[in-house]
Amino acid sequence: MTHNPESTTSDSLTQNIALELTCPIGLENILEKELHDLGLTETRLGEAQVKLSTDLRGMYIACLWSRVATRIMMPLATFKVGSADELYQAVAAINWSDHMHADNTIAIDCHGTNHAIRNTQFGAVRTKDAIADYFSNKTGRRPSVEKQNPDLRIALKIKRDQAVLSLDMTGESLHRRGYRQQGAMAPLKENLAAGLLMRAGWGKDTRFQQLVDPMCGSATFLVEAALISLNIAPGLRRQYWGFKGWKQHDHRLWQQLNDFAKNERLQPQDLTVSFQGTDREQKAIAAARENIKRAGLSNVVTVSLSAFQQHEFEWQQQPTLVMVNPPYGERLGDEMALVSLYRQLGDWAIEHALEGEMMLLTSSENLARQIPIRPEKSSRVLNGGLECRAYRFPISDSHIKAGSREQVGLSSGAQMVVNRLQKNQKKLRKWVERENIACYRVYDADMPEYAVAIDIYNDWAHVQEYQAPKSVDETKAQQRLFDVVAAIPSALNIPETNVVVKQRLRQSGKQQYEKVDQQQHEMVVEEHGCDFIVNLKDYLDTGLFLDHRPVRKLIQEKANGVRFLNLFCYTASGSVHAGQGGAKSTLSVDMSNTYTEWARRNLELNEFSERDHQVVRADCFEWLRQADGEFDLIFMDPPTFSNSKKMAGVLDIQRDHVDLIDLAMARLHVKGELIFSNNYRRFELDAEISERYEVENITRQSLDPDFERNQKIHQCWILRHKS
């Protein structure tokens, strides 16, 4: 490939320039090879960088044509920084008149600190002061700071007592090619995608006849591959460069190199390769199509809204390179949910891309092992700060693991779970459709060896693993959980990425409220005309107790015109149903900050006013002792046990339920009703309660078909004053 237009006479063309080209960790060799292919051969490898000695033309070529580099830096000085004064003096000693004018704008990027420069902002300010004072002393004028698109961007890097001051010749990261909108969903940066494509063997004269990305996201692999095949310089679309305000910039030479690059590109009709991608996420495909359009590749790259397993790709062109950046599963539960996806991905590649290759990027070695192909090699890279490995899988008979071609993808245990799930789903289908149920339990340890509960929330599956007895081997228990997770996508037609797995203990109480993650995975679900915010990942419970669905419906039916009190309200789902049923007012009490705020959001979501539908954070025992209001309908679902620091004492529902009920009944209108429920399996209602009040056990009526197998999940009574 030639990159030499008509020569331009300039002293700067013969001047040797020392540059440092940074790149994603793990792609140093790829960047060096790329530079050599561009005719820039005086290189030396470093960590996450390649040092290059060249002239001005070589620097421009690297800026315009490097697909792998992140930034191109020109070091001006290396010096010791033992104090702020040493930093100031070293910067002021540089001959800044060689690089800029006094009227130029500048921006300082400081990276790193030490004992003398304790924060990056201070380092940047001292550097700016030194440059400004340099020009002020010489000319009486000083440069101004411009953070966005300055004439010159200057980088200070501090490591221990050493500092390097450089000019940032690119001005902003080279991964920003100009075809992708800022903030669009795309965690894979363009230069990392290009580097992995090159590592896989994709080039202008590649042996591959097509590129396929079965989980294309915003199409970064596809666009970068097309740019390579069309020989389109990645820097052509960029509007801003750090060197354009540099005093030694040669505009004529830069324009010549740009014009030459424009003439080097191929036309789509000259291509002998094709580019296809799919993704099952509508947002991803929308972003992909926009990126493809902005890159001018609408007639080159094809993407479809589809799961790769169901999509009909055009396979006539072989061999194929499959490039894929699937979900990683950063938590154990998420990783388990992806086992089936990775196995299916490997089986799919074997079936359709035999004699080709697959390059797969993942942070999970365990998931990579699920691919039924032995990798030829893997290399460490960083993707968005997350340590990953890029695995190269030759899709050939010699690399396919023994038995993989005959495997159906599911173990015998997983197939058992599939059969049971499909049986349960079929049994529940008519009820779900008739009642318009969006959230329900489809499995609850039906087979004792597969001790999990599986709940459906719209098109998500929420899997809660019960703790296995100590007598069960831990490895065997984990394998059974893998079987369950592998069975769900095919049995329930739910995407692998929509399976959430949690481990929980059989006992309830405080643990059900503890936070287990920080992902804030919220969604809105509907139940009997009410909307609720649920969170499938952050807590052991989701914000909606599915077993209480009939109780909430009962509250809704009884609520018209009543004053409703919801004790231990959790996320106030009962109050929302009461409001939907026409309650005159609702009052929800809970001592958790998290859940009272969640309760307010649920009420607001359903457009109930704070004036008539209040939420109070308080210990229910203490609140009842001090309350003086009267209510027509009270719902109380206390935990089995609580020793929260926010409480005056410790709550034990078996020991304390008589006092608790008496306090609640004191607030109940003479013709009112108290609905009392709890989930302590060995709970027994004290005989005193039946002596004092009318008691109706409605436990059986309070269970829908999805909880028929687990009739001890809660007990429920209606209590009334005796007439």
Image (cartoon, grey):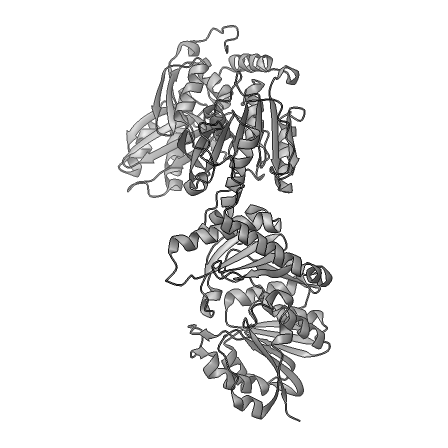
Locate residue 243, reporting x and y percent.
48, 22
Q: Is residue 371 above or below residue 719?
A: above
Q: Residue at x 66, y 57 (%)?
A: 426
Q: Residue at x 52, y 55 (%)?
A: 537
Quarter occupied by residue 39:
top left
Q: Say how many tags the image has.
A: 0
Quarter occupied by residue 27:
top left
Q: Is residue 581 above or below residue 167?
A: below
Q: Is residue 678 above or below residue 530?
A: below
143 left or right of 18 in image: right
Locate residue 186, reporting x and y percent.
55, 37
83 or 382: nearer the viewer: 382
Q: Residue at x 57, y 89 (%)?
A: 690
Q: Is residue 579 above or below residue 3?
A: below
Quarter of the picture holding the C terminus: bottom right
663 left or right of 558 in image: left
Asked if residue 490 can be seen in this view, the reply is yes
662 or 83: nearer the viewer: 662
140 or 656: nearer the viewer: 656
283 or 654: nearer the viewer: 654
Asked if residue 239 can be seen in this view, the reply is no
Locate residue 519, reporting x and y percent.
50, 52
Locate residue 336, reporting x and y percent.
48, 49
